[in-house]
Amino acid sequence: MQYVFCEEGVYEGICIWLSKRGSCLFQCLCKAMQLEIDTCAQRPTLENAQLCQGYECISVLSTPIDAALLQKLQEVGVRFLSTRTVGYDHIDLAYARKIGIHIGNATYASESVADYTIMLILMALRKMKLILQSAVSQDYSFDAVLGSNLKGKTLGVIGTGAIGQTLIRHIAGFGCRILAYNPHPRKEMEQYVTYVDLNTLYQNSDIITLHVPLNDATYHLLNEAAFARMKPGVIIVNTARGPLIDNTALIAAIESGKVGAAALDVVEGETGIYYNRRKGKILKQHDMAVLNSFPNVLLTPHLAFLTDDSYRDMVTHSMKSCYLFMHGEENPWLIQ
């Protein structure tokens, strides 16, 4: 038997559902793979890192794993950390490499984020935030809720990896023109899109949606200079990573009318806020509070990935990744 320690239930708002479902999935998978696991409802911290004593592998969600925590995990014997997310920008990869902790991620069905993105695009076009707010207050007038069709619009897709490609295939039937940017254009997508440079995409798109990883090259990709090159009234959609957009520049662009609407499942500064109950509390992340106050900005709490299929994939791939690491076999989810 090999041993894995798993963090579960970090989504405090839906902790019971995820914990029960997660425990069932973990136990079924681990029985089949002859793995012994323990689970913990706490996020890994410096204070509770000793709970990992004796475990070669740990499986986490989007908890920030900095150098200090990695050092503590290494001291108690952790050799492999699997994050049940596609992105791994919450982990200090450089320090993990320095101290010999290997890192893996988990892939899941691209349809979950792609279809959620299409939903946000349509909601932004149809001013759904205002419609829902008006319905709650029993205001059924037409005032301020005149929307637009997607047909005939130009959609700019930044990033044509798995999610970007799925989005493009699914949205192509809406009758919109699609421009795309990717450092390495995908020939198989040319039947759906026209690949252009970023400036051309900015200048010609009515809607811009982001599907790139967060790294040094993409940090604040949408900044003041980028917004200045866009069409007046452009709609911005982000289901990738919050820091792809400079919040200060976005707020200024919304206030000036350069950005006509935004639909954001991710926002820079969301860590420690999303996945927690904040009802009735002061939102101390000022940019998020400002964005949430705008009638033409829709914020959702980083849930684009959350479907039954994707959740099953996240658990399955994390456990398989741990198994492959411990048996020295080729691991498709190994990052380093």
Image (cartoon, rainbow, N blue to C red):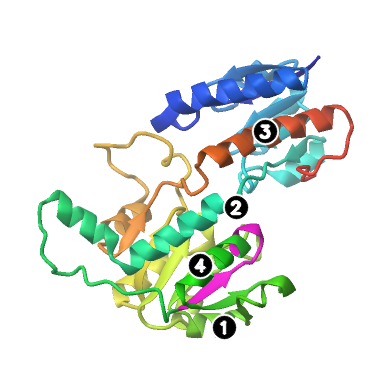
Q: What residue is at 80 percent from the left and 42 percent from the top?
A: 97
As for residue 63 lying within the magenta part, the answer is no
Q: What residue is at 50 percent from the left and 21 percent from the top?
A: 20
Q: Along the horizontal axis of the image, is 280 left or right of 115?
A: left
Q: Secondary structure at mark 3?
A: helix
Q: Whole-Å distance between the Cαs marked 2 and 1?
A: 27 Å
Q: Residue furthest front?
A: 173
Toward the viewer: 314 or 246? 314
Which label belongs to residue 110?
2
Residue occupied by mark 4: 171
Which label belongs to residue 316?
3
The three-letter code of the residue at mark 4 reads Ile
Tell whether label 2 touches label 4 (CB within 8 Å). no
Residue occupied by mark 1: 199
The numbered mark, 2 or 1, whose residue comes first in the sequence reads 2
Q: Secondary structure at mark 4?
A: helix
Toward the viewer: 169 or 288? 169
Vertical relation: 133 (above or below) 41: below
Instruction: Point out residue 87 in the picture as x, y percentages from the top left corner.
Output: 63, 48
As for residue 158 lying within the magenta part, the answer is yes
What is the magenta range?
154-164
The numbered mark, 2 or 3, whose residue comes first in the sequence reads 2
Q: Nearer the viewer, mark 2 or mark 1?
A: 2
